[in-house]
């Protein structure tokens, strides 16, 4: 969830879960666990976000209780080059990654999927930078009168 724009954590969680369920439930999928970082910038690597780090650890556990991960919005999950650094772990452990914008699971051999996820990482970085500029500009405009 976004830390920069102070979005309500429950509202953010609710709409992301709705998007995730809308993607997987028609295929018989269901959510068995949630990993939802609150108060940690998307710019932090996954290993430095508590819930994301827990998810990475769960990938390695053969008794993890899930065979796929679905994210509500790629811009909130992946920042900059994080997809390229993280997705190989999903592939290594045989866990699919489902993304609404792709309409299902990411195909590790599909160059278009890799490209679109890289674009989302770049969009995430740009969005965070725009928010930072707006916040600093607003704070400057509210300075001492």
Image (cartoon, helix red, strand yellow):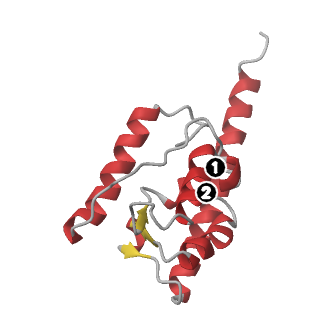
Image coords of residue 94 (percent x, y):
49, 77
Q: Could you classify mark 1 by the number of other residues whose Cα lies within 10 Å: few (under 14), some (14-19), or many (20 or more)?
A: many
Residue 72, by quadrant, is bottom left
Image coords of residue 90 (percent x, y):
54, 72
Question: Considering only vertical position in the picture, is 21 above or below 28?
Answer: above
The residue tagged with tag 2: helix, strand or loop? helix
Residue under circle 2? 124
Image coords of residue 39 (percent x, y):
60, 35
Task: First in sequence, mark 1 or 2: give its number.
Answer: 1
Image coords of residue 96 (percent x, y):
44, 73
The residue tagged with tag 1: helix, strand or loop? loop
Please tell me which residue is depicted at 63% across the width and 68% down the height of the picture. Answer: 86
Q: Which of marks 1 and 2 is in front?
A: 1
Q: In which quarter of the image is the C terminus?
A: top right
Question: Which label sits on residue 42?
Answer: 1
Question: Considering only vertical position in the picture, is 32 above or below 11?
Answer: below
View extreme (right): residue: 144
Q: Which of 142 and 1 is in front in this view?
A: 1
View extreme (top): residue: 145
Please tell me which residue is depicted at 40% across the width and 33% down the height of the picture. Answer: 10
- Labels 1 and 2 touching (C-beta < 8 A): yes
State the separation of the CA atoms marked 1 and 2: 8 Å
As drawn, is 4 to the left or to the right of 58? right
Q: Could you classify mark 2 by the number of other residues whose Cα lies within 10 Å: few (under 14), some (14-19), or many (20 or more)?
A: many
Residue 25, by quadrant, is bottom left
Question: Considering only vertical position in the picture, is 76 above or below 68?
Answer: above
Q: Which of 127 and 142 is in front in this view?
A: 127
Please tell me which residue is depicted at 72% across the width and 41% down the height of the picture. Answer: 133
As drawn, is 145 to the left or to the right of 101? right
Question: Considering only vertical position in the picture, is 47 above or below 60?
Answer: above
Please tell me which residue is depicted at 53% across the width and 84% down the height of the picture. Answer: 108
């Amino acid at each position: 969830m976004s830390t920069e724009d102070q979005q309500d954590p429950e509202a953010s969680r609710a709409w992301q879960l709705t998007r995730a369920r809308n993607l997987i439930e028609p295929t018989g999928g269901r959510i068995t666990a949630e990993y939802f970082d609150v108060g940690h910038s998307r710019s932090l690597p996954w290993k430095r976000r508590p819930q994301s780090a827990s998810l990475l650890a769960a990938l390695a556990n053969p008794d993890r209780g899930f065979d796929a991960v679905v994210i509500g919005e790629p811009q909130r999950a992946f920042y900059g080059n994080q997809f390229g650094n993280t997705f190989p772990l999903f592939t290594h452990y045989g866990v699919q990654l489902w993304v609404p914008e792709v309409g299902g699971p990411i195909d590790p051999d599909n160059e278009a999927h890799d490209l679109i996820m890289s674009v989302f990482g770049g969009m995430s970085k740009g969005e965070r930078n725009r928010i930072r500029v707006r916040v600093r500009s607003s704070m400057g405009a509210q300075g001492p009168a």
